[in-house]
Image (cartoon, rainbow, N blue to C red):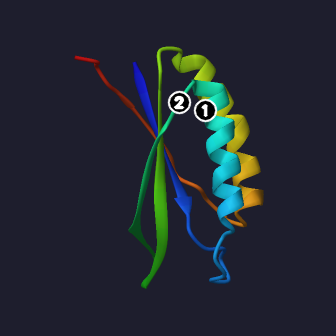
Amino acid sequence: MKEYDIFVPSTFNDGQPIPAEKLTALKLILVKQFGGLTYFPQENEGLWKIGRTTFGDRITILRVLTEDESEADLFLCNLKPELLKEFGQEEVLIVSRDVQRL
């Protein structure tokens, strides 16, 4: 089984908040594709460094689980460019992990 976390920004690059409707639409897309999701509504802080400058962003996390890794990889790789455009980002982090159901 594979677990995917999508780190969704809370603001556009100019600092304006991303409308809640955009997050709601993404949740519906993921539920349709994966049959469910876990939404971690608490905001988290992401930091990264380029050269000597440290950048920060506020994010929330959406998590999905699947048995079909290859289909999920293809779906999320195709979704990512849409997320970049929709959320006005240069990057949206999506991570995957192997997990085992107990």
Q: Is there CB contact under 8 Å for labels 1 and 2?
A: yes
Dot 2 amino acid type = Gly
Q: Position of residue 36 (x, y in %)?
A: 53, 30
Dot 2 surroundings within 10 Å: few (below 14), some, or many (20 or more)? some
Q: Position of residue 91 (x, y in %)?
A: 61, 59
Give me the residue at 56% from left, 64% from top: 9
Dot 2 corresponds to which residue?
36
Whole-percent x, y for residue 61 in the image: 46, 52
Give left or right: position of 28 versus 36: right
> Which quadrant, please, contains the N terminus?
top left
* Figure quadrant of residue 14: bottom right
Identify which residue is drawn at 48% across, 64% down.
59
Judge by depth and name the residue closer to the eye, 14 or 32.
32
Residue at position x 46%, y 77% in the image:
56
- Within 10 Å of disc 1 (Cα), the crowding (few <14, some 14-19, many 20+) is some
- Distance from label 1 to label 2 (Cα)? 4 Å
Image height of 70 relative to 65, above or below: above
Badge number at residue 31:
1
Which of the 4 image quadrants contains residue 44?
A: bottom left
Q: Position of residue 95 (x, y in %)?
A: 46, 42
Task: Note whether 12 is above or below 41 in the view shown.
Answer: below
Rendered residue at 70%/58% (across/down): 22
Mark toward the start of the polypeptide (1 vs 2): 1
Is 50 placed above or below 42 here? below
The tag on residue 80 is: none
Element type at marker 2?
loop
